[in-house]
Amino acid sequence: MKKANLLLATMLLALSVASFAQPDMKETVAMIKTNLLQSKEKVKQYAWIETTKTYIKGELKSTKQNQCYYSVDGQLTKVATGASEQAKTPGGLRGKIAAGKKEEMADYIAKAVEKIKAYLPPAGEKIQQIYGAGKVSIQILEPNKKFKLSFPDYMLQGDVLAISVDKTAQKLMALNVSTYIDKPEDKVVFDVTYKDLPDGTQYPVTTSLVAAAKDLKIVIEQSGFKKGAGL
């Protein structure tokens, strides 16, 4: 009897500790939505540099750089700078074959970049919808402080959007997406790291997309933020 009571007490204690370590899901989702909305509006006050590097089979193939800002009508504007570079294509028959493959890859890269744009920034209403359907799962990264919330079927059937948060600091830390370009077997994953500007605005400092089937990696970096150069 004593052993049974001890076992029951141990189980209750474990459940209590696990419950205490978990954040309030509703509150955490609300924090994510608020942070995304506030940062989306605040970043319109800035201008910054966006650098996109494309790697194929581990080799850097191109570097594109844009000056980014929001126009008076609220539209994101990107102007190419002089820092863009493209790998040269060989001449002759070999060059024609390479050019054909290059064009095909360029189309795929364009789709991959559009895919990133489709998920960034995450839409608060979609996050709320998935939470309301009871489909959100949570992983404890650091007890009582850091957590990862996963939102399945965020945009496509079978995809997963995961957001890591520092609940204590009320900040986003990272975002991870597992999705696909055209078909489910055409899987791509990308990881986003967030950083804070002095006024608390959060932005994706680095976004890294990997398409293993194409030996493709795209890295987008945001830097050089200057306030007062936007709207």
Image: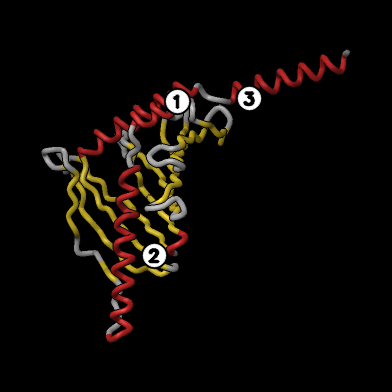
- Label for residue 18? 3
**Where does label 2 land, which residue?**
55
Could you classify mark 2 by the number of other residues whose Cα lies within 10 Å: few (under 14), some (14-19), or many (20 or more)?
A: some
Q: Is residue 54 left or right of residue 13?
A: left
User: How far apart in space, not on screen, are marks 1 and 3 (Cα)?
Assistant: 23 Å
User: How far apart in space, not on screen, are marks 2 and 3 (Cα)?
Assistant: 43 Å
> Residue 137: x and y, percent?
52, 31
Q: Report the residue at 41% width, 50% height from top.
A: 180
Q: Nearer the viewer, mark 1 or mark 3?
A: 1
Residue in the foreground of this view, choosing between 129 and 57: 129
Specify the quadrant that holds the N terminus: top right
Mark found first going from the N terminus, 1 or 2:
2
Could you classify mark 1 by the number of other residues whose Cα lies within 10 Å: few (under 14), some (14-19), or many (20 or more)?
A: few
Q: Could one spot residue 174 in this view of the protein?
A: no
> Residue 194: x and y, percent?
39, 42
Disc 2 to disc 3: CB gap under 8 Å: no
Answer above or below: position of 138 versus 100: above
Could you classify mark 3 by the number of other residues whose Cα lies within 10 Å: few (under 14), some (14-19), or many (20 or more)?
A: few
Q: Report the residue at 30% width, 85% height from top.
A: 93
The amino acid at mark 3 is: Ala
Q: Nearer the viewer, mark 1 or mark 2?
A: 1
> Residue 149: x and y, percent?
48, 33
Answer above or below: position of 43 versus 13: below
Mark found first going from the N terminus, 2 or 3:
3
Specify the quadrant that holds the C terminus: top left
Residue in the foreground of this view, choosing between 3 and 135: 135
**Where does label 1 land, which residue?**
133
